[in-house]
């Protein structure tokens, strides 16, 4: 069971996973060594599975943010999943969902032309509904 200190550590690490253990300790009222020990315990127990970076897609030239609801035509999804592996440069997340579709793709594209080509190629494997992000 996690206590308030552990929850504070998780909160601080989720804001900035590059924080020093000394700084983390100060924020949760521990020494740097005690904070490092707690973090190690959270990692060992599988609460912290890893650390990631957040990439600014706009700085990489990807100006179109799209959510695509995927509707497969059969229960055999392998053709769609194989297609998705060939287009990983555009895909942020591929969620298997329940509800209106089978999957929800979150994608970034540098141009409408590349989005259109992606959708035309996708249509060989599944039907879709497209939503474009206007503002975050």
Image: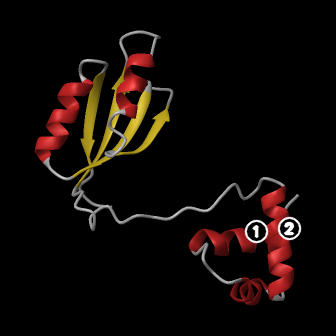
Mark 1 lies on residue: 7
At which x and y percent is residue 71?
36, 21
**Local SS, label 2:** loop
**Dot 1, crowdedness within 10 Å: few (<14), some or many (≥20)?**
few
Are the two marked residues, 1 and 2, in contact with CB atoms closer than 8 angstroms?
A: yes
Q: Nearer the viewer, residue 48 or 6?
A: 48
Cα–Cα span, label 1 and label 2:
6 Å
Q: Position of residue 57 (x, y in %)?
A: 32, 61
Q: Quadrant of the N terminus?
A: bottom right
Which image quadrant for residue 93?
top left
Q: Which label belongs to residue 64?
A: none
Residue 101 at least partly seen: no
Taking the image as drawn, is residue 50 in sight?
Answer: yes
Q: Residues within 10 Å of mark 2 (few under 14, many from 20)?
A: few
Spot occupied by residue 27 in the image (x, y as percentages of width and height): 71, 86
Is 20 left, or right, of 94 in this rendering? right
Q: Residue at x 84, y 55 (%)?
A: 45
| Left or right, 100 with reference to 35 | left
Above or below residue 16? Residue 27 is below
Residue shown at the point (38%, 22%) measured from the top left: 80
Mark sitting on residue 3:
2
The residue lying at 76 percent from left, 56 percent from top is 47
């Amino acid at each position: 069971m996690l206590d308030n200190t552990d929850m504070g550590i998780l909160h601080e690490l989720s804001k900035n996973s590059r924080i020093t253990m000394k700084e983390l300790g100060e924020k949760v009222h521990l020494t740097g060594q005690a904070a490092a020990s707690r973090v190690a315990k959270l990692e060992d127990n599988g609460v912290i599975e890893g650390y990631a970076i957040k990439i600014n897609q706009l700085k990489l030239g990807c100006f179109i943010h799209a959510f695509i609801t995927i509707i497969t035509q059969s229960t055999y999804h392998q053709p769609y999943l194989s297609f998705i592996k060939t287009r990983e440069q555009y895909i942020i997340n591929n969620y298997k969902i329940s509800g209106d579709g089978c999957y929800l793709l979150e994608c970034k594209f540098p141009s409408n032309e590349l989005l259109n080509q992606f959708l035309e190629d996708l249509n060989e494997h599944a039907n879709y509904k497209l939503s474009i992000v206007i503002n975050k």
